[in-house]
Image (cartoon, grey):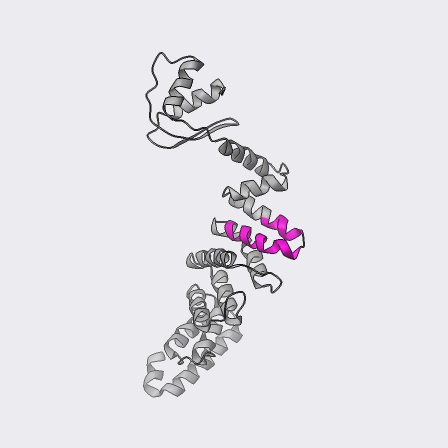
Amino acid sequence: MRIDRPILCMAVMALTCPATAQVASGDVLVGRVQGELALPAAAQDAAAITAILQTASVRVDLDGLQIIQLHKRMVAKDPLSTAELRFLADSGDSLAAFKFATMLEGKSKASVLPDAVHYYSMAVYLGRDFGQSRLIALMSSHDVQLNAGQLKSARDALAKLSNEGDADAALALAGMYEIGWPFDKDAAASRRWLARAAKDGNSDAAQKLAFATIMPTDGSTPDPAAARAALAVLATSKDPGKVAIAQNLLARLDAQAGPDTKEVSQ
């Protein structure tokens, strides 16, 4: 098999690295060149270089070349075919995953929406959080039937955002567990995600959590301490109506607990 001299030379240069290397020059990529080898001073012609590469079991990753070229085209707004965009998305390119999900959703076919969820999940998990709103919308739709793997990927993407401080993602998960779609209904899980969102300062989550811990709907024991923590967040809201709700519920908790607890809460 003939290997072009520029690619061979780049590969040999990569061999000076102690581990896996990726080398790009212009539009030429040699990816994952493996092995360690000292370049003999006499190795100047293509035949000698070819022998060196064969000895080192060098593998030129042509997929890597294609990925680089497709990404450049995508960023330059050079239209990619459906197959090219999907290939790039499947390679782990987060922007391509978002664009491919958007393309699928735009087809307005229910049969492709689960795949759109998959690619939105990939994009969000890899840092494209602007895909969150569409991911949540599709997950919440009863017209989108997701399999176990797609559900896990979608949940993991939102959980990652939530754990990074995104209260909207936590609130969305709480709502899904509260209504029982697309996950099974789980009031305890809903309260946990509400607590996460409230901790990040979301007043809507704080209000929902306060009611859920004062009057649980799943038969669990009321949790006044959790309710007070939620109401403390709600009381910092810029919405006067929410502040009034927090004050009224705190007063009710104080009345139920007795004068000693009231003094502590004040």
> Looking at the image, is 75 positioned above or below residue 23?
below
Q: Main secondary structure of the magenta part?
A: helix
Residue at left 48%, top 59%?
Answer: 155
How many marks the image carries: the answer is 0
> Looking at the image, is 70 positioned above or below residue 168?
above
Residue 8 visible in the displayed image: yes
Residue at left 40%, top 87%?
Answer: 255
- Residue 5, image x, y percentages: 47, 18
* The stretch drawn in magenta includes residue 197: no
Q: Nearer the viewer, residue 131 or 14?
A: 14
Q: Nearer the viewer, residue 158 or 242?
A: 158
Residue at left 37%, top 77%?
Answer: 225
Residue 228 quadrant: bottom left
Range covered by the magenta-colored residues:
101-122
- Residue 245, image x, y percentages: 49, 78
> Looking at the image, is 181 positioned above or below residue 131?
below
Residue 266 visible in the displayed image: no
* The stretch drawn in magenta includes residue 120: yes
Residue 73 quadrant: top right
Residue sitting farthest toward the front: 1
- Residue 250, image x, y percentages: 42, 80
Q: Split into 4 quadrants, where in the image is the C terminus?
A: bottom left
- Residue 131, image x, y percentages: 55, 53
> Looking at the image, is 105 positioned above or below residue 8?
below
